[in-house]
Image: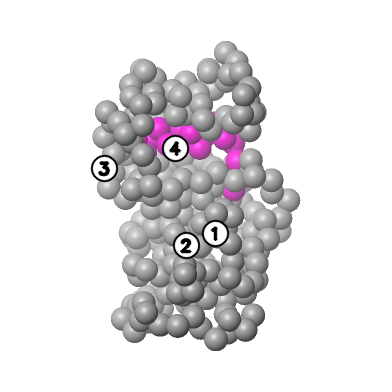
Amino acid sequence: MAEIVRLDGLTLGYEHHPAVHHLTGGFAEGSLTAVVGPNGAGKSTLIKGIMGLLRPLSGRVSRRGLVPGDIAWLPQQAEIDRSFPITVLDTVLLGLWRRTGGLGAVTPALHAAARDALAAVGLAGFERRVIGTLSAGQTQRVLFARLLVQESRLILLDEPFAAVDARTTTDLLALVRRWHDEGRTVIAVLHDLDQVRRHFPDCLLLARELIGWGPTAEVATPALLARARAMAEAWDNNADWCRRGAAA
């Protein structure tokens, strides 16, 4: 199957400190991949690099045939400003910018699409609620509704099930499976390995460097997970930038 995202020697970091080293590989179109690894392994950094929010220090990301509107991103909840006084419906409508443009009018049909998305995530009747009044699980449902209306080919999820209840997780996993069935490409940062093994056929295991990438049954193994943990224990956050990255 053709690759929709290709990484070639990708190196990412902040202020010359290592985060992701020399990562090479590709995500097939229509694949469903979990990105796993110890805390600080570079998982969220990788998502931002694929999204184009973080410029590579060396190597490159190739988004094959994708324009910005073809990529949807769900950041971690900690990055969401829930104090901004915006309604649930308007939050979902923000996902329609590709069709409305910066100043475009939201037609009745687009309003209906947003309401349908809210119904799909179990929040019919919440349209006029202010986002800051919602629980963590309800907020995540709203953000998934926004992803639904975007209808993007590539969907990037950063810890989508963190700090939400079990019922919400089950419902949102059903949407992830729906996207996969529709042929969309989904890449998700996750911590629950049982969840990864049950629902994600492919897995990328990081410990700042690539540990394994392929079918989940072959990557999320005790041996490779132990190797990732051992590498994490040896990290020096004050280390100089690696020489391979500086020479690239």
- Say which element carries label 3: loop
Tell me residue 42's x, y (percent): 44, 67
Residue at image location 63% in from the left, 22% down from the top: 104
Residue 106's disc is: none
Which region of the structure is painted magenta? 138-154
Dot 4 and dot 3 residues touching (CB under 8 Å) = no
Task: Describe residue 25's horizontal placement relative to residue 126 as left or right.
Answer: right
The tag on residue 144 is 4
Q: Amino acid at mark 4?
A: Phe
Q: Closer to the N terminus: mark 1 or mark 3? A: 1
Residue plotted at (49% across, 80% down): 241
Write down the quadrant of residue 131 in the picture.
Answer: top left
Nearer to us of marks 2 and 4 is 2
Quarter occupied by residue 101: top right
The residue identified by callout 3 is: 165
CB under 8 Å between callouts 2 and 1?
Answer: yes
> Can you tell which of label 1 and label 3 is closer to the viewer?
1
Q: Residue 13: x and y, percent?
A: 49, 69
Judging by the rendered image, the residue that carries numbered circle 1 is: 54
Question: Would you call the spot at circle 1 few (<14 residues within 10 Å), some (14-19), or many (20 or more)?
Answer: some
